[in-house]
Amino acid sequence: MNLIVSADENWAIGSNNQLLVRIPDDMRFFREMTQGKVVVMGRKTRESLPNGILENRVNVVLTHDRHYKAGNAVVVHSLDELYQQLERYHTDDIYVIGGESIYRQLIDECSTAYVTKIEFAYSADAYAPNLDIMQDWELAAESEEQTYFDIIYYFRKYIKK
């Protein structure tokens, strides 16, 4: 499985169930990487999406709420149920897209992480695992410095050792 996230310098990913910042090239990168693939998310992430679903992808929502309905998304209620659902797809075609609890629950199942790393510290209430301090992850590639107005960011690829 893959993990894909946009995080600030403290690995913050969101505030009040919203992204910290919307960078067009980051949104394009996310779309290109996940188009036609499987995206795994939690309920709050699904509810933060403009249309409640990411089109042209298999949307899988992990939630403890047994009564939760998510339109065209596949809803699962446990990790066992999630893994059963994901067995039908190639692991390289699965992207974990958040939020915080989903990243933490599935980080050990991921082998590659695509991180848009923003050089700024935002006020936030949700965080991704800090791959820079996790001993089983290493930075494998980093883009040149990118800018969007006054925001400096990098596209990074991490590989699990």
Image (tube, rainbow, N blue to C red):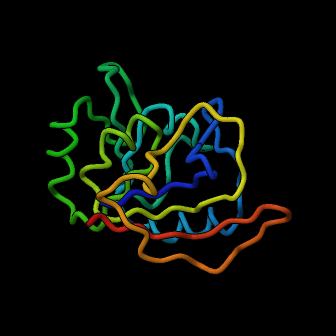
Q: Please give the name of the residue rendered at 42% of the width and 53% of the height, measured from the top-left corner.
A: 133
Quadrant (top left, top right, bottom left, bottom right) of the C terminus: bottom left
Name the image quarter holding residue 94. bottom left
5 horizontally vs 154: left or right: left
- Please say if 68 is above or below 149: above
User: Residue 118 at what x, y percent from top left?
Assistant: 66, 58
User: Which of the 4 image quarters holds residue 136?
Assistant: bottom left
Q: Report the quarter where the N terminus lies.
A: bottom left
Is 63 on the left or on the right of 149, as rendered?
A: left
Closest to the observer, 138 or 40:
138
**Which residue lies at the image location 60% right of the left edge and 31% below the top edge?**
125
Q: Is residue 44 left or right of residue 125?
A: left
Q: Residue at x 62, y 43 (%)?
A: 50
- In this view, 106 is above or below 113: above
> How many badges with numbers are in the image?
0
The residue nearer to you, when weighing 156 against 55, is 156
Vertical side of 90 occupied by 21: above or below: above
Residue for point 67% across, 69% down:
25
From the viewer's side, name the closer residue of 18 and 130.
Answer: 130
From the viewer's perspective, tell me whether residue 149 is left or right of residue 75. right
**Residue 92 rendering spot, x and y as whole percentages:** 28, 68
Q: What is the x, y in percent for residue 24?
A: 71, 64
State the residue in front, 59 or 115. Answer: 115
Q: Residue furthest right?
A: 149
